Image (cartoon, rainbow, N blue to C red):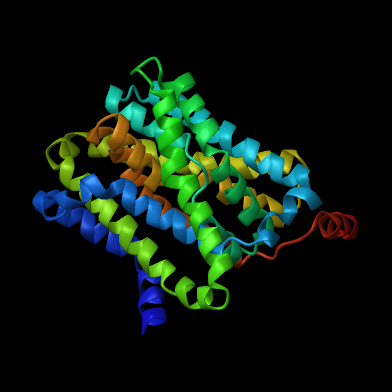
Amino acid sequence: MIEKISKFCNKYFALLVILVAAIGLFKPGTFLWVVPKVSLLLGIIMFGMGMTLKKEDFKEVFTRPKDVLIGVVAHYIIMPCVAYLLCLALRLPKEIAVGVILVGCCPSGTASNVMCFIAGGDLALSVCISSVSTLLAPIFTPLLILLLAGKWVSIPVTGLFIDIAKIVILPIVLGVIVNKVAGSASKEIVKFLPMVSVIAIVLIVGGVVGANSKKLITTALVSIGAVVLHNLFGFLFGYLAAKVMKMDEAKRRAVAFEVGMQNSALGVSLAMSFFSPLSAIPAAIFSVWHNISGPTLASFWANKKVLSNAENANEKLAQ
């Protein structure tokens, strides 16, 4: 039953988020109780990530460090820079601009691994890039926010570092420990995790929309436009960066998803804790949108055969 519910939640995740967002918009009081618990819910999601991590997930760092480095560097350069340029080009209001940059400076989202698998990308590389970018988040996320959003607001770098460590790194470490200690029992626990993560993200979105229901109507159009462009440029430039570095097609797809899909729940939590509820809107919208664009791109690529560099070269010679 739990597995069936989990599959249902995963399949209709985007619809559930849209439904809860609509409820939060028109009946804001419904999910306001979630707002003080956003960090706790994110911690639960990260604990689940830790439960699924294995030492094999990091072997790519040592067997092909160049590929992992390309993915992580591309992620932490492309998304923050695109966010900053969009803020300038669209002349976003201060609080929305901070929110867009905040999302851009977050690590990869765990959903990117699922999308990479569906798309026929290099799953091992995808998992490693998302894991490494997450572990590096306490350092890179605050510094990038300071660099890019400092012109709009004062950035509490130390506070951001501590908060990211508490709600991201600590739960992941605890998850890894529990997975190790629980042994075979951890396999049963893991079955609950997709459902728990979906419920947590849905509640976070409901809380953020409810807290901003009055302002959201006036800022929704520009926020949605910025988020959609941010995500699509992330996919495009991530793919092109991997192509420029002469990665094969499977790796390009992995990097594209790792660059374009963000841990938007972290963006929501940091915005609510350090900036303003309105700054959390872009991250909340990102949670909905990248779970529409990601599966769409994954389905498109799933129907396209993946060729290695050698196979591509042979095909060109044959032509």
- Residue located 37% across and 35% down the image: 226
**Which quadrant would residue 193 be assigned to in this image?**
bottom left
* Residue 121: x %, y % from top left: 65, 60
* 51 sits left or right of 279 in the view: right
As drawn, which residue projects farthest toward the bottom?
Answer: 1
* Residue 298 seen by the camera: no
* Residue 283: x %, y % from top left: 35, 42
* Residue 294: x %, y % from top left: 48, 56
> From the image, which quarter does the N terminus lie in?
bottom left
**Which quadrant would residue 181 be assigned to in this image?**
bottom right
The correct choice, above or below, for 240 with respect to 200 in the image is: above
- Residue located 37% across and 69% down the image: 195
> From the image, which quarter does the C terminus lie in?
bottom right
- Along the viewing direction, whichever of 308 and 124 lies nearer the viewer: 124
* Residue 250 seen by the camera: yes
**Which quadrant would residue 139 be assigned to in this image?**
top right
- Residue located 38% across and 61% down the image: 197
As drawn, which residue projects farthest toward the top?
Answer: 151
* 29 sits left or right of 237 in the view: left
- Along the viewing direction, whichever of 305 and 204 lies nearer the viewer: 204
- Along the viewing direction, whichever of 160 and 120 lies nearer the viewer: 160
Q: How many marks?
A: 0
As drawn, which residue projects farthest toward the front?
Answer: 181
* 254 sits left or right of 94 in the view: right
- Residue located 32% across and 51% down the image: 40
* Residue 314: x %, y % from top left: 88, 59
